Amino acid sequence: MLKVDIDTKVKFLHGFSHKTRIQILECIKDDEKTVSQIVMDIEGNQSNISQHLACLKGCGIIVGRQEGKYIYYSLRNQQVRDLLSMFDEVLVDVENDVASCDKHLGGGDC
């Protein structure tokens, strides 16, 4: 079994702990996109989206690919895509419990 430092694991999971970051991940789950495409798709503002993209990139969840003056963002690999799908599968089972939990009402910022 792989042994991962608990603090590293917490930092990684923090990347998934904000609504905007989850919206970004869902937005780029199937196709890479530029910041302006992401802003348009999730109806956010560019400054805020850019900060969340930096967090996701810093957590190792996404990567950016430069092409001309644009950076195209995508999920790091298939494992991250699978993890997002696994979140959905688990949530189907625990959705009611999570919805009624009032202990954690929002994600922290990076």
Image: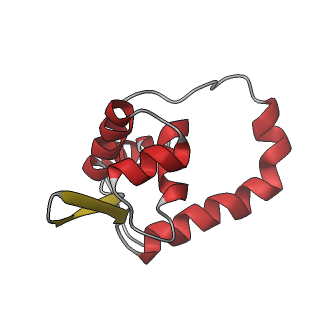
Name the colouring of the figure: secondary structure
Expressed as whole percent of the image width and height from the top left, the position of residue 59 reads: 31, 49
85 or 30, which lies in front? Answer: 30
36 vs 79, left or right, is left
92 vs 68, left or right, is right
Residue at the spot x=50%, y=65% of the render?
Answer: 29
Identity of the residue furthest to the left in this view: 68
Residue at the spot x=30%, y=57% of the render?
Answer: 60
The quadrant holding residue 63 is: bottom left
26 or 99, which lies in front? Answer: 26
In the picture shown, does residue 41 fall above or below 99? below
Give the number of marks: 0
42 or 64, which lies in front? Answer: 42
Identity of the residue furthest to the right in this view: 96
Q: Quadrant of the C terminus?
A: top left
Q: Quadrant of the N terminus?
A: bottom left
Residue at the spot x=38%, y=73% of the render?
Answer: 77
Expressed as whole percent of the image width and height from the top left, the position of residue 97 reads: 81, 39
The quadrant holding residue 73 is: bottom left
Expressed as whole percent of the image width and height from the top left, the position of residue 106 reads: 58, 26
In the picture shown, does residue 42 fall above or below 79? above
Residue at the spot x=55%, y=57% of the render?
Answer: 26
